[in-house]
């Protein structure tokens, strides 16, 4: 009892949606990894692949939306099924946004690479990208493993990305002040860092949704926030 | 700074919720058991019916939900082999006490059945019958008033006001059911029991009856047995899930249909039973 629906095709419909989420998760992971690697290595071919992957991501999201809407209309899912369907729609939205942000990073690879080698310019953006990648991989794996406690924990880890973003922001500012010729590359890198930070936020959303899907409980609204770049500087 | 605001907001919401849960119990089942001869159909059911709320009873066929509903106005008395144990109260008064007049009890706790069952009489007489035998309206003008207001409350007045002398059986299924609801309302009950009131109706008639149930809640306490999970989710504030004669789970409807506590409830409402 508990595993299968009386109507077997209901299971197939839910399975198809769950498969799409997992596919989109894998694609998001590969796009984020690809875009940051392309950025740090000035790899234009890889960047191009990430840009074209985004079209696949969009198509998957549209397919998931269609399937979810049809399933709601046909089956009127309840309880955990309802949470799974609604949660999938929302998670797909976040995964699609992660794809967009990765594509945006990839599109900047050419411009940044023309002027300087980014790795020399910013060590901390590399560290930040690694943190983001760990988060993206973590949320996909823990949702697949149905580990609600790990998802709640992972959501709080986003704080570390925010801290990192603040330090990247300061570092890039310093480079720009040092030598105005760095400004173009640093501005692009700053956008990339902001995109990475946004990816972290979407991972947080996915973790919250996944936690709700699995438990029916909303995580508390307040979460520690450490992005201080928007705060005014202390008086000198 | 933001955190403080959010926390105080959560506290405010919490207080509102606890004030709301402090509601009047209209009927209470205390360890209710029902036997049909040797066979026990219901086991130790503890269930509160709250004032001016709709309580939905759900569960697979044979789970005891209709049996429990029928205990609430002693309909099981009409079955010779049936025996009820435990205690059921209406406004804290034991309805199985010897001093209780069953006819009067059924006027206070009315019932609407699965299949619309108007008397083979005029629309007017269908509604007037109850108030007449209970002596609620002595003069013709008073009776006209009772009939009109009951039909209005049952949201069927506009459809039948010009043909009150025509037979009630000539109405459509949905209209017949609303006529039966008007008939139940006519004796000014406090509680209305509904046993799958929409299962013989088309979707539009069902929607009308559901709309009506929501309006009636202002003045009456309603207990409804339904096989339609969506209907229970739509019309009720509380839901009770029965299985094999036991009450499995009872709680706020919103929670029952999004995040039930009991695995059996989860399996039943998501269509995974058996």
Image (cartoon, coloured by chain):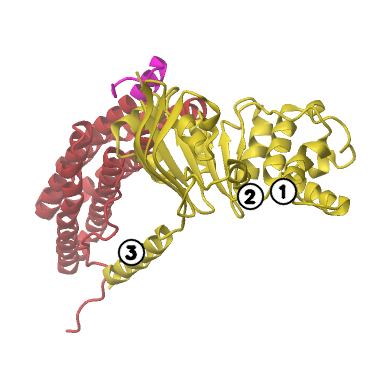
Chain colours: A red, B yellow
Mark 2 belongs to chain = B
Same chain for mark 3 and mark 1? The answer is yes
Cβ–Cβ under 8 Å for marks 2 and 3: no
Query: In the drawing, what numbered circle is on residue B215?
Result: 2
Circle 1 sits in a helix, a strand or a loop, which is it? helix
How far is disc 1 from disc 2 in space, using C-alphas? 8 Å
Query: In the drawing, what numbered circle is on residue B10?
Result: 3
Vertical side of A228 occupied by B40: above or below: above
Q: Is residue B125 left or right of residue B256?
A: right
How far is disc 2 from disc 3 in space, using C-alphas? 31 Å
Q: Name the residue rendered at 48%, 36% in the picture.
A: B71
Q: Name the residue rendered at 65%, 44% in the picture.
A: B212
Q: Is residue B200 left or right of residue B97?
A: right
Query: Pointer 2: residues within 10 angstroms few (<14), some, or many (20+)?
Result: some
Q: Nearer the viewer, mark 2 or mark 3?
A: 2
Residue A14 lies within the magenta run:
yes
Q: Nearer the viewer, mark 1 or mark 2?
A: 1
Query: In the drawing, what numbered circle is on residue B177?
Result: none
Mark 1 belongs to chain = B
- Which residue appears farthest toward the front when viewing the image? B98
- Which residue appears farthest toward the top when viewing the image? A8
Query: Pointer 1: residues within 10 angstroms few (<14), some, or many (20+)?
Result: some
Same chain for mark 1 and mark 2? The answer is yes
Stretch of the chain drawn in magenta: A1-15
Mark 3 belongs to chain = B
Which of the two labelled residues, at mark 3 and mark 1, occupies the earlier sequence position? 3
């Amino acid at each position: 009892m508990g595993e299968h629906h009386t109507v077997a095709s209901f299971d197939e419909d839910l399975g198809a949606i769950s498969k799409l989420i997992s596919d989109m998760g894998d694609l998001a992971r590969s796009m984020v990894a690809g875009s940051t690697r392309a950025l740090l290595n000035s790899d234009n071919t890889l960047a191009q692949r990430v840009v074209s992957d985004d079209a696949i991501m969009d198509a998957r999201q549209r397919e998931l939306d269609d399937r979810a809407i049809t399933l709601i209309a046909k089956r009127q899912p309840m309880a955990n099924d309802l949470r799974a369907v609604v949660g999938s729609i929302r998670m797909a939205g976040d995964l699609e946004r992660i794809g967009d942000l990765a594509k945006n990073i990839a599109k900047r690879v050419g411009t940044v690479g023309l002027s300087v080698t980014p790795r020399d310019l910013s060590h901390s953006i590399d560290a930040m990208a690694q943190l983001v990648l760990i988060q993206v991989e973590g949320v996909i794996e823990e949702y697949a493993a149905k580990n609600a406690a790990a998802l709640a924990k992972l959501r709080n880890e986003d704080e570390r990305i925010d801290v990192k973003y603040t330090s990247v922001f300061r570092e890039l500012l310093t480079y720009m002040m040092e030598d105005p010729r760095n400004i173009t590359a640093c501005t692009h890198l700053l956008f990339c860092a902001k995109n990475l930070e946004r990816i972290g936020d979407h991972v947080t959303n996915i973790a919250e949704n996944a936690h709700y899907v699995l438990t029916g409980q909303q995580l508390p609204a307040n979460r520690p926030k450490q992005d201080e770049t928007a705060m005014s500087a202390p008086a000198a | 700074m933001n955190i403080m605001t959010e926390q105080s907001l959560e506290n405010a919401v919490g207080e509102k919720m606890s004030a709301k849960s402090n509601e009047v119990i209209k009927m209470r089942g205390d360890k209710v058991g029902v036997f049909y001869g040797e066979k026990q159909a219901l086991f130790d059911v503890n269930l509160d019916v709250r004032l001016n709320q709709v309580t939905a009873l759900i569960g697979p066929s044979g789970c005891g939900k209709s049996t429990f509903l029928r205990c609430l106005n002693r309909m099981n008395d009409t079955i010779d082999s049936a025996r009820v144990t435990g205690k059921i109260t209406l406004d804290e008064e034991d309805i199985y006490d010897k001093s209780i007049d069953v006819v009067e009890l059924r006027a206070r706790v009315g019932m609407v059945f699965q299949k619309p069952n108007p008397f083979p009489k005029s629309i007017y007489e269908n509604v007037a019958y109850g108030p007449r035998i209970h002596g609620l309206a002595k003069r013709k003008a008073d009776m006209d008033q009772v009939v009109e207001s009951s039909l209005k409350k049952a949201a069927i007045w506009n459809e039948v006001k010009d043909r009150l002398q025509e037979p009630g059986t000539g109405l459509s299924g949905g209209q017949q059911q609303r006529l039966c609801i008007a008939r139940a309302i006519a004796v000014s009950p406090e509680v209305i029991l509904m046993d799958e009131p929409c299962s013989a109706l088309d979707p539009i008639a069902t929607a009308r009856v559901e709309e009506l149930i929501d309006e009636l809640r202002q003045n009456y306490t309603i207990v409804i047995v339904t096989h339609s999970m969506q209907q229970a989710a739509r019309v009720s504030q509380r839901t009770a899930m029965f299985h094999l004669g036991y009450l499995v789970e009872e709680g706020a409807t919103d929670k029952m249909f999004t995040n039930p506590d009991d695995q059996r409830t989860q399996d039943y409402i998501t269509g995974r039973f058996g």
